Image (tube, rainbow, N blue to C red):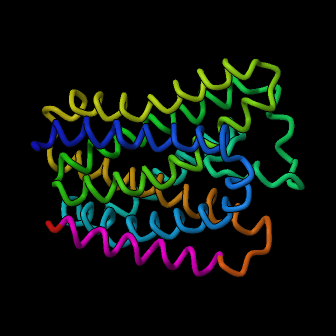
Amino acid sequence: MNNITSTVCYGIVAGLASCVGILLLLYREKWARRHTNNLNSFAAGAILGAVFLHLFPGAVSVVGEGAFFWGLVGFFIFYILENMVVIHSSAEKFYLEHDEHHHLSSSALVASIGIGLHSLIDGLVIGVGFDINRHIGSIATIGVILHELPEGMAIFSVLLESSISRNKAIFYSVVVALATPLGAILSIFFLSGLTEHTVGVLLALGAGTFLYVSASDLIPATHLRTNKFSAISLTSGVVFLYLMARLFPE
């Protein structure tokens, strides 16, 4: 597949990962609640591996040490986004004793828009990755898929607790999931004509957003409930990412 086809196909797969999260909450809620801690830990480890082993090195190879500055900017942008929307992309709402975000039930639409924007950016990151090379694009896709799964569960959980109907909750959740392939498709047009340096800056921004998701969303969610397997799951995520990366050599 060429880069354009890969961007579209992998963007669709990433969007489907969010739909899988919705289905898990619909049909396997008890299983989802029981395993969400390990899921968050594994995803956090894989994303950290993607950021430090591949995305930042790829950005540095294009824009030099300035990549770390743009990574910080990306981290800060997502901090502002979540600070304004007050919703995390992890599945922390599955912890029944953790109810500090209960007020979100009155802000379901805002939460949907916030995570929808997040998903749109995820799709753009996939496109940026493939614009640099197939290796970076594949790694970026793996990172997106792994955090889209708990993200799908998170937004659907929020919507279910709101005053809207179950069918509307499903509809809005699917719309949010579609934002990822939409972002991937838009990236094809957005990236045309951009210089290699600019694309490298965008990759660094994407790496910063990934780092934020792992360090500020997923890992804190794993601390909400004591689980001796969390560290093992996180380490497994890093190892999994490393092994998967070997299947997509540069």
Residue at left offset 66%, top offset 79%: 229
- Image position, residue 167 (x, y; %): 67, 19
Identify the residue at the far left of this view.
2
Residue at left offset 47%, top offset 52%: 209
Tell whether 97 sits left or right of 112. Answer: right
Residue at left offset 31%, top offset 75%: 243
Residue at left offset 42%, top offset 43%: 122
Tell whether 201 sits left or right of 224. Answer: left
Q: Quadrant of residue 183?
A: top left
Q: Is residue 240 magenta?
A: yes
Q: Is residue 155 magenta?
A: no
User: Tag count in the figure?
Assistant: 0
Q: Where is 201 relative to 34, above or below? A: above
Q: Where is 2 relative to 39, above or below? A: above
Q: Quadrant of residue 136?
A: bottom left
Tell whether 38 sits left or right of 61. Answer: right
- Image position, residue 188 (x, y; %): 21, 32
Between 115 and 85, the one nearer to me in the picture = 115
Quadrant assignment for the N terminus: top left
Between 38 and 151, the one nearer to me in the picture = 38
- Image position, residue 227 (x, y; %): 74, 75
Magenta stretch secondary structure, dominant: helix
Question: What stretch of residues is rendered in magenta?
Answer: 230-248
Between 85 and 10, the one nearer to me in the picture = 10
- Image position, residue 146 (x, y; %): 47, 55
Quadrant assignment for the C terminus: bottom left
Identify the residue at the far front of this view.
27
